[in-house]
Image (tube, rainbow, N blue to C red):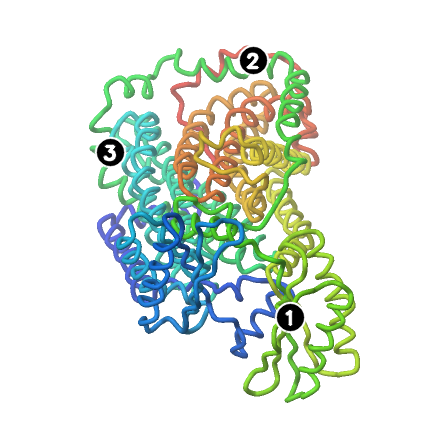
Amino acid sequence: MKPDNISTRIARVSARHPVLAILVWVLVIGACVGASAATGMRSATSAELAVGDAGQAARLMQEAGLEEPATEYVLIAGGAAADRTSAATRVTAELGGIADVAAVAGAVPSQQRTDLLMVPVVLRGDPQTAYERVESTRSAVERVAKEFPALSVEQTGSASISAGLNEQLANDFASAEILSIPVTLLVLLLVFGAFVAAVIPLVLALTFVAGSVGLSALVSHLIPDSGTTSNVILLVGMAVGVDYSLFYVKREREERHARPDGGDSVEIAAATSGHAVVFSGIAVIVSMCGLYLVGDPSFNSLASAAVIVVAVAVGGSLTVLPALLVILRRVLDRPRVPFIWRITNKRTEAAPRLWPAVLKPSLRRPLSTLIVVTLGLIALGLPGLQLSLAAQRVEDLPAGIPAVAAYEKLSAGFPSVGAQFEVVVRTAGRADWVADGLRGLAEKARTAGLVSGDDAVSEVRTSADGRTSVIALTVNHADGSTAARDALTALRGTYVPALTAQHDGVTAVVGGQTAADHDYDRNMQDKLPMVVGFVLLFSLIVMAITFRSLVIGVVTLVMNLMSTAAAFGVLVLVFQNSWADSLLDYRSTGTIISWVPLFLFVILVGLSMDYHVFVLHRVYEEARNRVPIRDAVVTGIVHSAGVVTAAALAMAAVFSVFATLSFNEFKQLAIGLGVAVLLDAFVIRAFLLPSTLLVLGRAAWWPGPLSRRRNDTGVPPLAPAADTADEPAPVST
């Protein structure tokens, strides 16, 4: 009797009404895409993305209308001095007539280079959305550049950099889609040996991505997009979408080939692989929900993107995939790729020899294999102890974006005099003492040597209602330096509390870039144990309940940590050093972008549980039937190895595409995910898991009933596993 779980019931309805199921799916995806076009994606402002006191300061200034206007910079370099002066005059004339420009300052010569001028340009309107209005100034600068071909005339600034990043993200998204299709199709052809069977997972994954992008646009009006939503959806959606569909299609084909009339192959696939897809999806979704515990808008956006695409992938795999398999059943194995078809569908005893051979070290010397593999993974993970995290900086951005390259020239030619802090005070009502208090705070900071120079202290700016005031202080140290952070500590710990000590109902906070970076790092440090603990505890509980074994839960937890640590070690080796820069078209800054490791850890735990359950379930079933542990391990690995390795290769193929994109964080994420997935499939499942199970014996299933059964000490040969090559694939739950 076939299991009658939820995935089976859904598949049964879909299989009985396949045309209707496909039509409904197309309409749902179309509605999601249409909703996205109608509402658009809401991007988070810098004030929304900041956390802690710095975030509060940014939001208070934004609400009170006290933000500094956005400023762009036009750089004029090279050529003769007269030509540079003429070009600066033309820039002033061109930009001065643009409605979005509030003012154009006079040209400022660089003290570092004799052939460099800077023309500051102040933009009108909300500085948080200035990137939407910068195109007119960019066009004007391009016209001037054409008039002076002997000079370099470039524009940079936060608005033009943001606009360039958005354009590059869109280009990368399109490139990733185009590249991932042939790469993924090639892997699927190697797995199935037939074109139609290979195309189904690929096409479905593309619909998962399209629908998820549409849904994320709607969700962005509740949880604003941090700028990476679309690429995360494409990365995760193509990986899990192909993975889930591959499990399902491969099992359906095996069941159909095992029965002359095809039987109930779709329902059996739904009851087994479909149920595994549900488990995997829930595991990934719950793991990703751990990111919400960080309390960071960037992580909220990342988590929402991943949760949406995984949920859509699970839903599509359960509903429309059975319908496609019913309609395409007669042509699923056509057209065949001649040589590959013969290899992938060979039904002789010789077929399963690879994995029994791989298992020999674990079977002959399980303890030695366990020690060697563990030491190898630890060695690979040791560089991870040197993991250095940093918020994304200009150096991490693609140098191919003109505004980014120009900003580096600006920084070199006009180095900043120091970090700027904004001290923001908000009172319950109009308070005349605030302005004098802020000036007094600035004078104390000057006396203490924190600030110096006539331009180090700004005028006090007060909102129209008199409730919010701000003063800007420029300290004598560069942004992010230890001295700048010490200055922040002094402002927050001494000067600001002294300002508000005699007044009730006052909010006083310190913002600025150094403050924002400090608050981000502090928030990560505070929340990291909670997130990691939540995810690991979840994996332990799920595995312990699934297999009625606390030991299996602990083993899963340890293996998750080992594969993740190895991935972190590779990240450090590749990205904190410069040896792979030319290979990956990458500029090493000696750090890893701060959100990558946590996101990597959370998603890897969810994905690895998929493979872990798939393999362990077969071992568990064999052991429950009183099969000796060695035989159970061999049977479990041999029967599940093909689909696990195929799924891992498909995922790694998708991740490899993202390693070719422009943004450093996606290169880091792709390499980390790819390494971890391959290690998980080819090292953890092939060597570490079987050797661990053999060393533990029946104790692996403690305190469940399997741990109390007599342990058969017989050592069966590998032949029995080979003899089962023509049997259906294992039931996976």
Q: Secondary structure at mark 3?
A: helix
Q: Position of residue 467 (x, y in %)?
A: 61, 84
Q: In the image, is residue 627 above or below residue 274? A: above
Question: Counting residues from the N terminus, which is met first, the one under dot 1 or under dot 3?
Answer: 3
Nearer to the camera, 647 or 331:
647
Q: In the image, is residue 488 above or below residue 68? A: above
Q: Position of residue 383 (x, y in %)?
A: 64, 31
Amino acid type for the residue under numbered disc 2: Lys
Nearer to the camera, 582 or 20:
582
Q: Residue at x 44, y 18 (%)?
A: 724
Q: In the image, is residue 528 above or below residue 328? A: below
Q: Which residue is mark 2?
A: 360
| Crowd tier of the residue under label 1, counting other residues whose Cα lies within 10 Å: few below 14, some 14–19, many 20 or above | many
Q: Which residue is mark 1?
A: 457
Q: Residue at x 64, y 69 (%)?
A: 454
Question: Counting residues from the N terminus, which is met first, the one under dot 2 or under dot 1?
Answer: 2
Can you see residue 550?
A: yes
Mark 1 → mark 3, Cα distance in angstroms = 69 Å
| Crowd tier of the residue under label 2, counting other residues whose Cα lies within 10 Å: few below 14, some 14–19, many 20 or above | some
Q: In the image, is residue 616 above or below residue 344? A: below
On the image, which quarter does residue 433 sit in? bottom right
Q: Position of residue 644 (x, y in %)?
A: 46, 30
| Mark 1 or 3, closer to the camera | 1
The numbered disc on residue 196 is 3
Q: Secondary structure at mark 1?
A: loop
Q: Secondary structure at mark 2?
A: helix
